[in-house]
Image: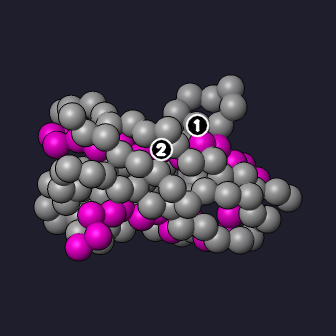
Amino acid sequence: QVQLVESGGGLVQAGDSLTLSCTASGLTLSVFTVGWFRQAPGQERQLVASISRGDGTTTLKDSVRGRFTISRDNAKNTVYLQMNSLKPEDTAVYYCAAKLLVAQNYNGWGQGTQVTVSS
């Protein structure tokens, strides 16, 4: 059973940066494709970024490309979401989740971490 833990959220001003961390106990994250998602009030949860198992290919949602970076540190068993030039519309609860195969759904959802960007 995959269980991930998100951390690093907070209250920042527009233009600031934050780095979110996604960790897991009892399993090796590097064998999973890991995604960062966000859900704003009244909206559906959306995939923001992903990093694949193996070659580490990354994907980014159009609205965050050029501002956000997803990366993994296998030695620390952690996947990061570096968020720069934050905007008020980035305000949401951010979650990470993982999957082994492309055809699978993501799972292992944690409690999420709140990111609030003030204007």
Instruction: Please tell me in which quadrant of the rendered image residue 9 appears.
Output: bottom right
Of label 1 and label 2, which has the lower sequence position?
1
Q: Nearer the viewer, residue 28 or 104?
A: 28
Residue at image position (79%, 65%) is 13
- Is residue 107 at least partly visible in the picture? yes
Query: Which residue in the protein does label 2 denote?
Result: 95
Q: Nearer the viewer, residue 13 or 7?
A: 7
Q: On screen, 85 above or below 48?
A: below
Residue at image position (53%, 67%) is 19
Residue at image position (52%, 33%) is 45
From the viewer's perspective, tell me whether residue 90 is left or right of residue 33: right
Q: Residues within 10 Å of mark 2 (few under 14, many from 20)?
A: many
Residue 69: mark in rendering: none
Residue 91 in the magenta stretch? The answer is: yes
From the viewer's perspective, tell me whether residue 104 is left or right of residue 40: left
From the viewer's perspective, tell me whether residue 97 is left or right of residue 90: left
Q: The magenta stretch spans which residues?
A: 75-102
Mark 2 secondary-structure assignment: strand
Residue at image position (63%, 47%) is 114
What is the spatial separation of the Cα atoms under label 1 and label 2, in whole angstroms? 8 Å
Q: Locate residue 81, reporting x and y percent.
A: 47, 62
Instruction: Please tell me in which quadrant of the rendered image residue 86 appears.
Output: bottom right
Residue 12 in the magenta stretch? The answer is: no
Which numbered mark, 1 or 2, is in the foreground of this view? Answer: 2
Q: Residues within 10 Å of mark 1 (few under 14, many from 20)?
A: some
Instruction: Please tell me in which quadrant of the rendered image residue 109 appears.
Output: top left
Could you tell me if the residues under marks 1 and 2 are in contact, i.e. CB atoms within 8 Å? yes
Mark 1 secondary-structure assignment: strand
